[in-house]
């Protein structure tokens, strides 16, 4: 399903935008009289997908050898409603999402960094990578839930 970094990134960018819609609709529903639980549910869904998108953006940034500023822009775009979609379009048009996953080293000197070796190890074991990412995202999500919602209660 996610044979290329571009495909994974696009799916999560669109999912992040969809969850903005869910959250905004929940806020509007609460404003017109619905129970506050709708915002809790919408916010929870959005928060989880936000974290998954951020993790995906970082993984793809390393794989695609993006400048740190491009990776930061990809992650920060999730803070602005619907901004992940135009960022995805821009990354495609600028060919920053072109290419496959890099499970093997090349002659490129950038393939000699410690984190590239670690990333290649995980890319050769996609189930281990998926479990690690999901576990990390869930752990961070639960920690954030325990801390409380943004802005307090």
Image (tube, helix red, strand yellow):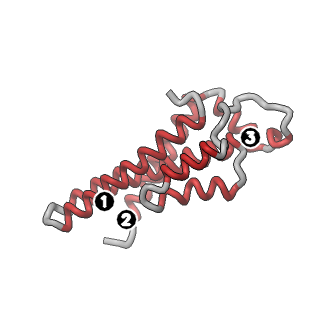
Mark number, residue 148: 2
Q: Who is closer to the viewer here, 9 or 129?
A: 9
Q: Tell me the CA gap for discs 2 and 3.
A: 35 Å
Q: Who is closer to the viewer here, 127 or 92?
A: 92
**Neighbourhood count class around disc 2 (C-alpha, 10 Å): few under 14, some 14–19, many 20 upward:** few
In the image, taking residue 77 as reference, residue 16 lies left or right, namely left
**Neighbourhood count class around disc 3 (C-alpha, 10 Å): few under 14, some 14–19, many 20 upward:** some
Residue drawn 57% across the image and 31% down it:
128
Q: Are marks 2 and 1 in contact (CB under 8 Å)?
A: no
- Which numbered mark, 2 or 3, is in the foreground of this view? 3
Residue 124 image offset from top left, x and y in percent: 66, 27
| Location of residue 103 by image quarter | top right
Q: Tell me the CA gap for discs 2 and 1.
A: 19 Å
Quadrant in the picture for the C terminus? bottom left
Q: Which of the two labelled residues, at mark 2 and mark 3, occupies the earlier sequence position?
A: 3
Q: Is residue 36 above or below residue 138?
A: below
Q: Tell me the CA gap for discs 3 and 1.
A: 38 Å
In the image, taking residue 50 as reference, residue 71 lies left or right, namely right
Of helix, strand and loop, which one carries label 1? Answer: helix
Residue 141 image offset from top left, x and y in percent: 43, 53
Residue drawn 27% across the image and 53% down it:
41
In the image, taking residue 133 as reference, residue 29 lies left or right, namely left
Of helix, strand and loop, which one carries label 2? Answer: loop
**Neighbourhood count class around disc 1 (C-alpha, 10 Å): few under 14, some 14–19, many 20 upward:** some
Mark number, residue 116: 3
- Which numbered mark, 3 or 1, is in the foreground of this view? 1
Residue 143 image offset from top left, x and y in percent: 44, 57
Q: Which of the two labelled residues, at mark 3 and mark 1, occupies the earlier sequence position?
A: 1
Residue 56 seen in the current view? yes
Q: Which of the two labelled residues, at mark 2 and mark 1, occupies the earlier sequence position?
A: 1
**Residue topped by disc 1:** 24
């Amino acid at each position: 399903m996610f044979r290329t970094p571009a495909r994974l990134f696009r799916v999560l960018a669109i999912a992040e935008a969809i969850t903005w819609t869910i959250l905004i609709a929940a806020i509007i529903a609460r404003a017109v009289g619905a129970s506050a639980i709708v915002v809790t549910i919408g916010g929870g869904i959005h928060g989880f997908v936000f974290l998954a998108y951020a993790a995906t953006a970082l993984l793809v940034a390393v794989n695609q050898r993006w400048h740190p500023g491009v990776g930061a822009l990809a992650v920060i775009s999730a803070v602005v409603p619907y901004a992940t979609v135009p960022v995805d379009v821009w990354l495609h048009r600028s060919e920053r999402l072109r290419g496959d996953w890099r499970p093997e080293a090349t002659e490129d000197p950038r393939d000699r960094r410690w984190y590239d070796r670690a990333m290649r190890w995980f890319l050769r074991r996609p189930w281990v990578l998926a479990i690690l990412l999901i576990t990390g995202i869930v752990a961070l999500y639960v920690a954030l839930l325990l801390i409380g919602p943004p802005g307090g209660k």
